[in-house]
Image (cartoon, rainbow, N blue to C red):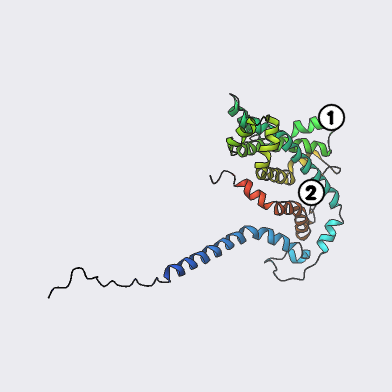
């Protein structure tokens, strides 16, 4: 007797999903996290070792192989703070903050004009800006020294402010222009239809949108100014000397004071670290503008 063709066929129940793919995914994620932390530790280890050395005595800091277990002390920080560190720190803060402010005041309108209203020679202008960074600083230090001497501007903080502004302005214009180009043109057109002129579009529409990009540009300019050594050591003596010049004093004919130098470097890096940590969210957004459409 033939089976009825209309009778439903017995179907096999689907097999329960196995846990192997999930386990493999979890193992892969854990391995990736471990590798990420290991790479981050490699990059951060010099800064950690610097901070660790700052809490050592000079004898412990100069041992070979390095001593990992020691009695921490604050003597090196007391020595650094007692050796006129604060005036050098004040000079660095003044030169860095004022030059960064001037860079933004000059660079924002320039980048805005080159991005919104480009002219026929825009590429030539941009190349001229970046070409100024191709000249080694050592090639211009003698003319700068002679000019500063004739203007009675040697060992003057305003000399460093002007030079740091000129040093950072080309990079700032390039960065800010790229951020301006990422702003949707529909926003600019809508503001123009409402009757807003170019200055109003810049200050009320563009800058609020690209504030993270401005923050990223400002931090990069601050880092370059804060770490600059060659101009400061050649054009200043005592009144306008900055923190990098101060740290050279720990290299003497008696030897290198490792612990004191580490303490001075730790104190010198704190302002930039604090500023970067405070504005890290804006910096991440600014540095990633245009990366994802």
When the figure is inspected, residue 213 is found, relative to residue 107, above or below; the finding is below
When the figure is inspected, residue 144 is found, relative to residue 268, above or below; the finding is above
Give the percent coordinates (x, y) of residue 78: 85, 60
Name the mark on residue 151: 1
Asked if residue 58 lies left or right of residue 196, the reply is right
| Helix, strand or loop under label 2 | helix
Quarter in which the N terminus is drawn: bottom left
Give the percent coordinates (x, y) of residue 215: 69, 45
Q: Residue at x 74, y 38 (%)?
A: 164
Q: Which residue is mark 2?
A: 243
Q: Residue furthest left?
A: 1
Q: Residue furthest bottom?
A: 1
Give the percent coordinates (x, y) of residue 35: 54, 62
Residue placed most toward the observer, 210 or 230: 210
Q: Residues within 10 Å of mark 2 (few under 14, many from 20)?
A: many
Residue placed most toward the observer, 130 or 214: 214
Question: Dividing the picture into quarters, in which one does residue 230 lie?
Answer: top right
Which circle's residue, 1 or 2, is located before the other in the chain?
1
Residue placed most toward the observer, 84 or 10: 10
Q: Residue at x 58, y 29 (%)?
A: 123
When the figure is inspected, residue 291 is found, relative to residue 106, above or below; the finding is below
Q: Residue at x 81, y 64 (%)?
A: 74
| Helix, strand or loop under label 1 | loop
Q: Residue furthest top?
A: 120
Name the mark on residue 203: none
Asked if residue 3 lies left or right of residue 253, the reply is left
């Amino acid at each position: 007797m033939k089976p009825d063709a209309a009778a439903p066929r017995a179907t096999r129940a689907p097999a329960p999903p196995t846990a192997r793919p999930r386990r493999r995914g979890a193992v892969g994620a854990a391995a990736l996290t471990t590798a990420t932390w290991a790479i981050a530790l490699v990059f951060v280890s010099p800064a950690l070792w610097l901070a660790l050395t700052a809490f050592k005595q000079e004898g412990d800091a100069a041992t070979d192989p390095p001593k990992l277990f020691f009695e921490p002390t604050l003597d090196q920080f007391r020595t650094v703070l007692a050796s006129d560190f604060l005036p050098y720190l004040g000079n660095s803060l003044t030169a860095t903050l004022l030059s960064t402010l001037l860079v933004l005041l000059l660079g924002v309108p320039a980048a805005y004009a080159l991005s919104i209203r480009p002219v026929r020679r825009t590429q030539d202008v941009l190349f001229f800006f970046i070409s100024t960074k191709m000249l080694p600083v050592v090639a211009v230090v003698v003319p700068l020294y002679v000019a500063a001497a004739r203007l009675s501007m040697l060992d003057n903080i305003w000399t460093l402010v002007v030079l740091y502004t000129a040093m950072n302005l080309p990079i700032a214009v390039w960065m800010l222009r790229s951020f301006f180009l990422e702003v949707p043109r529909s926003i600019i057109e809508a503001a123009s239809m409402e009757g807003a002129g170019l200055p109003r579009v810049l200050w009320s529409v563009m800058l609020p949108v690209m504030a993270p990009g401005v923050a990223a540009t400002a931090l990069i300019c601050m880092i370059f100014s804060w770490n600059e050594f060659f101009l400061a050591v050649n054009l200043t003596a005592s009144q306008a000397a900055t923190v990098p010049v101060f740290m050279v004093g720990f290299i003497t004919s008696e030897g290198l004071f490792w612990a004191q130098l580490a303490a001075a470097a730790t104190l010198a890096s704190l302002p930039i670290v604090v500023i970067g940590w405070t504005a890290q969210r804006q910096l991440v957004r600014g540095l990633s503008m245009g990366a994802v459409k």
